Structure formats: structure tokens, C-alpha cells
């Protein structure tokens, strides 16, 4: 519930995540968010303002993401971005990786 500010807790959390993203990812890069599943991977390519530019579902194992990453770099170039930064889940201990176009 919004408490005077008009923002919900979810709104505030999303805004904090966007600020954190802007501090890590260069403006000329897209962000590829991947929801990893056992046999199906769902990806969304986002710009620096967290707008979804493209989505894709790949029915491959998580260790077979090469074509999905290639698709993401092509989509990023289509939108004038110089590369893609791949995002992991928040609880991951691995840093984000940047792929050149």
C-alpha cells in the first residue's frame, strides 16, 4: 500500500533496482535478463531505462544458451546498442558479464 508518497513498496524496490542498474551498466549496453528453467529459457532484452526491447523463449537446456546470446546481441545492435550485459538472479554470487556486439 502506498503511504503518502503514492509509491508502493514494489514501486520503490523497482526504482531502486533501476538506479542500481544504471550504476553498473553503461548507457550504450542493453541488459539481457534470463529466467532459467530446465528445458525452457525465457529472455528479455531491456534498455537502460528498464524498457523491454525484445523477448524470446528458447526451448534449450541452460548450458545451450549460445544462440540466445547471439540473438540478444543482434537485437541490441538493431536498437543502436553496443553490446549486452547478462543479468543473473539477485542472489547470485557471480558478477554480470558483458558481451560485445
Image: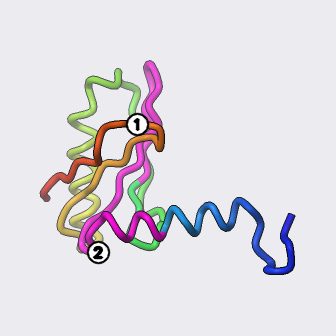
Answer left or right for 7 relative to 99. Answer: right
Q: What is the spatial separation of the Cα atoms under label 1 and label 2, in whole angstroms?
A: 23 Å
Q: Position of residue 89 (x, y in %)?
A: 45, 40
Q: Is residue 1 magenta?
A: no
What is the quadrant of residue 3 in the picture?
A: bottom right
Magenta-colored span: 19-44
Q: Nearer the viewer, residue 96 or 54?
A: 96
**Quarter of the image that includes the N terminus:** bottom right
User: In the image, what residue occupies the spot 35% across and 69% down?
Assistant: 23
Q: What residue would you read off at disc 1?
A: 92
Toward the bottom, the furthest residue is 5
The secondary element bearing badge 1 is classed as loop
**Of labels 1 and 2, the one closer to you:** 1
Vertical position of residue 20 compared to residue 28: above or below: above
Q: Which residue corresponds to the image point at 18% horizontal and 68% vertical from the top-left? A: 82
Instruction: State left or right for residue 16 relative to residue 5.
Output: left
Quadrant where the C terminus sits is bottom left
Q: Nearer the viewer, residue 75 or 5?
A: 5
Q: Write down the residue under mark 2.
A: 27
| Residue 37 numbered tag | none
Callout 2 secondary element: loop
Kindly identify the residue that appears in the image at 36 percent across and 48 percent down.
Answer: 87
Amino acid at each position: 500500500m502506498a503511504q503518502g508518497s503514492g509509491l508502493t513498496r514494489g514501486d520503490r524496490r523497482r526504482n531502486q533496482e533501476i538506479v542500481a542498474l544504471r550504476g553498473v551498466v553503461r548507457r550504450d549496453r542493453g541488459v539481457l535478463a534470463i529466467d532459467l528453467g530446465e528445458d525452457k529459457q525465457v529472455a528479455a532484452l531491456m534498455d537502460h531505462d528498464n524498457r523491454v526491447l525484445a523477448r524470446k523463449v528458447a526451448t534449450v537446456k541452460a548450458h545451450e544458451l549460445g544462440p540466445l546470446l547471439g540473438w540478444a546481441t543482434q537485437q541490441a545492435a538493431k536498437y543502436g546498442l553496443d553490446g549486452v550485459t547478462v543479468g543473473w538472479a539477485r542472489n547470485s554470487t557471480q558478477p554480470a558479464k558483458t558481451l560485445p556486439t
